[in-house]
Amino acid sequence: MSGGAGPSTLGGTVAVDVPTARELLEEVHKRIDREQITAIVHELELKSRLFAERLGPDAIRDADETVLREVLGCVFVARRRASAVLGTRPASELRDAINMLLYGDDAVGERLEAFCGKVDLSGLCAAELAGELLHFTQPDRYWLCSRFVYNAQTRTGALPLLVSEDFDLEADGTGAGYERAGIAIRSLDDSAETSSFRVDGGGTLATDLFLVCVYGVYMNTVLGLKMSQEFNSLIPPLPQLARRLLGTHRMAPTTAGG
């Protein structure tokens, strides 16, 4: 198994901005109900189970192109770019890169940096894919770094809204940024605000849903100020938006809300 299991604690502690988090949570619960939360967390559990089965320490050795395409189809940033991610090289090259990302001996930030250099995606998209592979294969060990969580280029996403201004999310390099974001996300895992999404369990996967819902509220608020009503109407309802960004919309039963 790999070293560097969790984010470094160097650089100070992080606190949740409780008043802002509660205000955002109130808006979130106007757009998504308990039944929908439970359903989406369950879908995330199914996704994580799929990743663990397909990319586990033993299974990854035999993963072929079909398996890799199945996994990529569950990742928002990759599902329409599976062929680009696979590239013209043998599928075994991507398999080996994923194996090193998940189970290499270096610190997780170093492994993520190396992985980003081996896939045919832009740096931001490659890091997003790496975060999904890490997190959904081992959700209690790693975390997401999707743009709805934190976009280091624009300094936007859910995290800057939820953590105190005293904690600096900026870092030198993609790998260090991933580790830095992990410190903030782990503080959210333990927060009372996130616990409201663990209505039927879910652990860190419930944190994923909380983050994407906060981002959805933020996006609707910003677009509501800047864009026309016709454009805003194109944004799907929050449960549907969450499913798409979290890559679970294909796992959702047709009777589920959103």
Image (cartoon, helix red, strand yellow):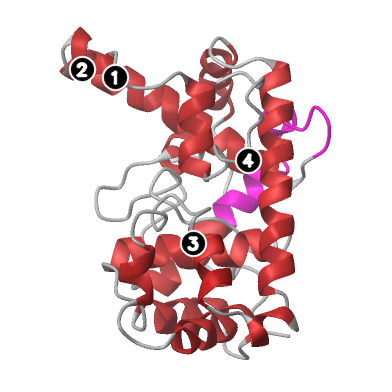
Q: Residue at x 49, y 40 (%)?
A: 164
Q: For residue 57, which numbered disc appears in the image?
A: none
Residue furthest to the right in view is: 200
Residue that carries the numbered disc 3 in the rendered image? 72
Left or right of residue 88: residue 110: right
Task: Mark 1: give few (<14), some (14-19) or many (20+) Cα within 10 Å.
Answer: few
Determine whether the residue tagged by mark 1 lies in a helix, strand or loop.
loop
Left or right of residue 204: residue 240: left
Q: For residue 251, which numbered disc appears in the image?
A: 4
Q: Is residue 42 above or below residue 120?
A: above
**What are the residue bounds of the magenta stretch?**
183-201
Q: For residue 231, which numbered disc appears in the image?
A: 2
In reply to whether residue 124 is colored magenta, the answer given is: no
Task: Mark 4: give few (<14), some (14-19) or many (20+) Cα within 10 Å.
Answer: some
Q: Residue at x 36, y 71 (%)?
A: 85
Task: Mark 2: give few (<14), some (14-19) or many (20+) Cα within 10 Å.
Answer: few
Amino acid at the residue labelled 3: Leu
Q: What is the C-alpha distance between the residues marked 2 and 4?
A: 28 Å
Nearer the observer, 219 or 132: 132
Q: Residue at x 51, y 14 (%)?
A: 27
Q: Residue at x 60, y 36 (%)?
A: 209
Which tag, 2 or 4, sits closer to the chain's start? 2
Amino acid at the residue labelled 2: Phe
Q: How far from the left and from the top, in percent, is residue 104?
A: 61, 88
Nearer the observer, 243 or 194: 243
Q: For residue 234, which numbered disc appears in the image?
A: 1
Q: What is the C-alpha distance between the residues marked 2 and 3?
A: 29 Å
Q: Could you tell me if residue 204 is visible in this image?
A: no
Which tag, 1 or 4, sits closer to the chain's start? 1
